Image (cartoon, helix red, strand yellow):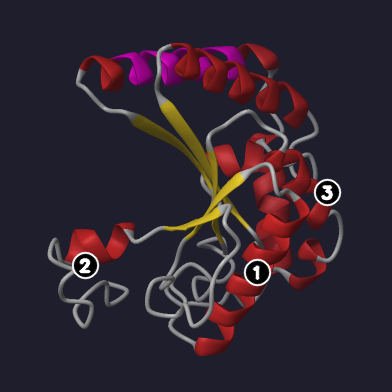
């Protein structure tokens, strides 16, 4: 999709459901065997934090949401097992999810219940991004102040609902904080550091959505 906003987001949701419909429990088991193998390599290489990217319409973001994949509970149980195994090795974990897909009708039903289920996972952090690539890329790359404000408000609301859970506020976060965040929210600045390794000293030059 070349446009930042899809002209037929409901069609995209239907396409997601069709894509994951043939995936069975055996496929999930094979998938997480690969996840564990990748994690073992990361641990051997010296990494101290491993993140599962389950946002933006990527495969895992479809599989963890029962609104899209009816067997999502099987996947969430596998995520929990993965996190527990990492913790037993002294490895910190996180999972990145989207606060919204960008499809208004889809997001209006079951969104809070989905996010609350994610917050119940035994990961170290829940990294809150937003948007699906095929639906609304503006939510992923929030260049509009109104979108950043909405993501901040939704992140704070989530953190206040789950005070025992640690969250990461991602997406233009460092440049938009004008007041204190709840103590269980950390700030994610990944893209800005990739674009400019000196970003913490030079905040005028970070990610330009490219």
Comparing 23 with 172, the one in front is 172
Comparing 152 with 17, the one in front is 152
Give the magenta-colored segment's residue range: 27-40
Taking the spot 58% from the left edge, 52% from the top edge, the residue there is 184
Viewer-side label of 2, 1: 2
Task: Return the residue found at the far right.
Answer: 109
**Residue that badge 2 annotates:** 200
Q: Estimate the spatial distance between the alpha carbons at disc 3 and disc 2, rounded to whole Å.
A: 36 Å
Q: Which element type, helix, strand or loop, lies under badge 3? A: helix
For the C terminus, which image quadrant? bottom left
**Residue that badge 1 annotates:** 102
**Residue that badge 3 annotates:** 113
Q: Position of residue 178 (x, y in %)?
A: 49, 83
Mark 3 or mark 1: which comes first in sequence?
Answer: 1
The vertical placement of 74 against 129, above or below, is above
Q: Position of residue 159 (x, y in %)?
A: 67, 56
Q: Which element type, helix, strand or loop, lies under badge 2? A: loop
The vertical placement of 83 against 14, above or below, is above
Taking the spot 43% from the left edge, 72% from the top edge, the residue there is 141
Q: Position of residue 48 (x, y in %)?
A: 31, 28
The vertical placement of 118 against 132, above or below, is above
Q: Estimate the spatial distance between the alpha carbons at disc 3 and disc 1, rounded to whole Å.
A: 17 Å
């Amino acid at each position: 999709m070349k446009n930042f906003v899809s002209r037929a987001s409901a069609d995209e949701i239907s396409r997601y459901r069709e894509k994951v419909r043939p995936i069975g429990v055996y496929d999930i088991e094979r998938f997480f065997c690969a996840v564990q193998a990748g994690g073992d390599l990361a641990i051997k290489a010296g990494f101290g934090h491993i993140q599962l990217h389950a946002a933006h319409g990527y495969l895992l973001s479809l599989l963890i949401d029962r609104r899209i994949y009816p067997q999502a509970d099987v996947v969430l149980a596998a995520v929990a097992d993965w996190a527990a195994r990492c913790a037993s090795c002294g490895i910190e974990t996180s999972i990145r999810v989207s606060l919204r897909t960008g499809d208004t009708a889809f997001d209006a039903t079951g969104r809070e219940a989905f996010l609350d289920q994610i917050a119940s996972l035994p990961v170290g952090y829940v990294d809150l991004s937003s948007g699906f690539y095929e639906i609304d890329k503006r939510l992923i790359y929030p260049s509009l102040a109104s979108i950043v404000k909405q993501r901040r408000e939704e992140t704070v609301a989530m953190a206040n609902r789950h005070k025992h859970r640690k969250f990461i506020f991602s997406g233009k976060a460092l440049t938009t904080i004008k007041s204190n965040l709840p103590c269980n929210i950390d700030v994610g600045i990944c893209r800005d550091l990739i674009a400019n390794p000196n970003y913490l000293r030079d905040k005028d030059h970070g990610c330009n959505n490219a």
